[in-house]
Amino acid sequence: MWHELVRLNLVRIFYPCLMIFGTVGNILCLKILLRKRFRRQSTCQYLCILAVIDILFIYMRSTRYLYRYIYNADLRNASLWICRSFIFFSSTLSHLASWILVIVSFDRYFMIKNLLARRDAKSRVIQSTCILIFIVCTANLHYLNILGIHVTIQSPVVQINNNILNETSHTITRFICMPRPSYRAVFHLYVPIFDLLFVAIIPFCLMMFTNIGIIRTIMTTNMLCATSRKQQRNNRLTVMLLSVILAFMLLTCPSVIYICLNRLTSSKTAASNRKLLILDLLEALWYTKHALNFILYTLSGQDFRREFMKLLPCPRRKTINILTNPQ
């Protein structure tokens, strides 16, 4: 059916392209944002951290689909350690990707309001990021305890001896990456609510609040006084940040909300092909956001485009250097 064909092409074509494009794009973001023009800005330092998180997120999420396509098995069922660590790191990265945007939004808002000192940017970024990682990892530690069960399966074995048919059973023990029976009800009820709140809804509300404050402050400042060159540069950096936050609101939030609500309302019966296709498309949309940073920065940031052009080989610049510095 065409549902299965679309889902197959997502795994066979989309996810490998996403891994390549996301890796190259985020590495370019790191290379440009760490240049002298940007690296002293706390906003750019947070965006560098976001680029690293996005690379790890894309690989963690895409690897499971590629493994299933190649080996026709779920990577999480390989062992207890892989099961728990894979889901722990996947959940941790999804939370970090949302909350690092919340932190950088508040940081930018306080910077525009002149409530933070620019000279303490590096230490502030390191401290806030370490605190965030500690809190998010602590909040996801339950995955290291409640997941993983061994299921015993009776497999029939047929033997023929002297034209006599003998049927016996063979016991097979398999590992399945799912919550233990005592935690199953809690897992299926509270974990989707937890992800819904802390990956999508609460970050969305906080970013909406800070974005409104940032836009109002910039508009008020531009109306009351003439915009200096430094202020124009800060405004362009703010537009870059707003473009990433807008992508989060348009791509991540709707996808995560639908996926979590589906986990809450889904019954024990098998999902239809149409629902599986919708879920796969929304997950692909969610993951795509983590590969779009380079495009968003290039389209919205004039200074980012200039620094990117400096990375490209320019024949005209080489010609001028040869003419001005003859040997």
Image (spheres, helix red, strand yellow):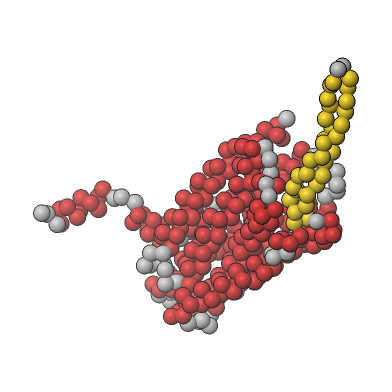
Residue 12's spot in the image, x, y percent? 60, 37
- State the residue at coordinates (87%, 16%): 163
Residue 104's spot in the image, x, y percent? 55, 70
42 relative to 269, above or below? below
In what quadrant of the picture does the C terminus appear?
bottom left
- State the residue at coordinates (66%, 59%): 88
Query: In the drawing, does residue 266 fall left or right of residue 109?
Result: right
In what quadrant of the picture does the N terminus appear?
top right
State how many labels appear.
0
Judging depth in this view, the residue of 302 and 186 nearest the camera is 186
Residue 7's spot in the image, x, y percent? 67, 38
Query: In the drawing, does residue 326 fall left or right of residue 115?
Result: left
Can residue 96 be spotted in the picture? yes
Judging depth in this view, the residue of 311 and 65 nearest the camera is 65
Residue 178's spot in the image, x, y percent? 76, 52
Furthest residue to the top? 163
- State the residue at coordinates (73%, 64%): 142
Can residue 223 be spotted in the picture? no
74 relative to 46, above or below? above
Judging depth in this view, the residue of 316 and 62 nearest the camera is 62
Furthest residue to the front? 162
Hey, which quadrant is residue 73 in on the image? top right
Query: In the drawing, does residue 317 fall left or right of residue 216?
Result: left
Query: In the drawing, does residue 8 fall left or right of residue 304?
Result: right
52 relative to 169, above or below? below
Furthest residue to the left? 327
- State the residue at coordinates (41%, 64%): 34
Hey, which quadrant is residue 169 in on the image? top right
